Amino acid sequence: MPDFKSILKESETNPYGIRTPNPTTWPQYPYNTMPRTPEQSESRYTMQCDWNQSVTMRDGVKLLLDIYRPNRPGEKFPALCSFSPYTRQLQRENNPYGQNEAGISEFWVSRGYAHVVVDVRGTNGSEGDWDWHGPEEQRDCVEVIEWVARQPWCNGNVGTMGCSYFAIAANLVASLQPPSLKAIFPYDCQTDSYRQSHYPGGIPNDGHARLWSAAVETLNFRSGRNPNTAAMKKHLRDLLALKHSLDGPHYWERSTWSRLAEIKTPAYFGCHWLFYLHLRGPFNAWMGTGNITKRMLIGPTPKPVRPFAAYHMEALRWYDHFLKGMNSGVLDGAPIHLWILGENTWRDEYEWPLARTRWTEFYLGGTAGKGTLTDTAPLEGEQTLDYRPGSDPWLWGQPHP
């Protein structure tokens, strides 16, 4: 297994090494040594691109999507669907843009999977009003998955691919239980839009809101491909104006925390320790889902972070098992894989929370603008935090300096 330094060096010297059948991204497995993989899909197919395809929804609205699939007429393959408002054309770029998160088509197609990248309702070239993870968008995802399963090049088995918005869409659609959705691999996936994304601790996450809104605006408003931007402008305006400052139906219908038990699909949850926006999500999903086949990994910050290409080899083992029926070994051993910061090693666990946990009460403190976290109660008094959201250095999951 390539080590971190060699992967990092390759990514620095070869900026075009990501969108390939073997992306130069670390890590690819949540293990210290190469896992036992008796059967694995090999990279052997060339890619056929069916761009600008459309599928009609229940109300007549047409969504546009790009299909990347093995160039093997007459054969059927499982498919992975990716849903977002981030414009499907971004899938052809090596740009380390924050929204470049759908996964690597070249990796999947070469190994015998179709990859379907969808512009959700009201974004880029798709018709209708953008619903931002809302009920209409969720129903669209169900319909697209079933449409994909019926295509002559699909074997009827569908999964999902992508992180962040793509992963949130995966959890939401899985809770609706479309028959053809056989497994999901949601990475970087919050489960509570209010507490984990927009108002952590009840405080507006203004820095993220501005960065994210600017990115969505740039992708959708500057190209001229989206003739119906009114709904998107309203969502972004409401977000920046802090219109939905209290938890309520607006967030409940766009979050999976109350519906996790409705996910019956095998699920592999994941994130990295320093991505505060999504870190609580996989833990909540692990504890909130019922007696399903599930795995979880919490790892180091991938190198590079975007385009999203981390853990594709582990996801391959997952999908080879559930979408192709292969003996991939992905269900061997412990179901939880944790990267231990400081020790820089993976550790396997069988439960969460850990039964051996020693619960300790910590207190916030600090002086001269520097925060502390101690197990000793601070003296009585007040402290002031200088919060400047425009200088937020989070940069799509990068560690703070």
Image (cartoon, rainbow, N blue to C red):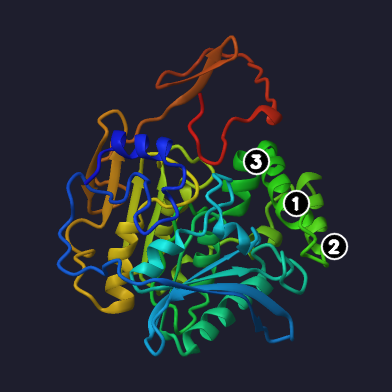
Q: Name the residue under label 1.
A: 217
Up the image or down, 223 lies above or below 341; here it is below
Residue behind mark 2:
230
In front: label 3 or label 2: 2
Q: In this view, does 70 lie to the left or right of 277?
A: left
Q: In the shown orientation, is residue 345 left or right of residue 361?
A: left
| Residue 104: x %, y % from top left | 45, 59
- The tag earlier along the polypeptide, 1 or 2, is 1
In-front residue for pair 166/92: 92
| First in sequence: mark 3 vs mark 1 | 3
C-alpha gap between disc 3 and disc 1:
14 Å
Mark 1 belongs to which amino acid?
Glu
- What amino acid is found at the position of numbered circle 2 in the picture? Ala
Image mark for residue 208: 3
Image height of 320 relative to 25, above or below: below
Residue type, numbered disc 3:
His
The spot of residue 167 in percent (x, y) is 50, 60
Mark 1 nearby-residue class (10 Å; few <14, some 14–19, many ≥20): some
Q: How crowded is mark 2: few (under 14 residues within 10 Å), some or many (20 or more)?
A: few
Residue in the picture at 51% in, 28% down: 400
Residue at x 75%, y 74% (from the top left corner): 127
Q: Distance between the residues labelled 3 and 2?
A: 22 Å
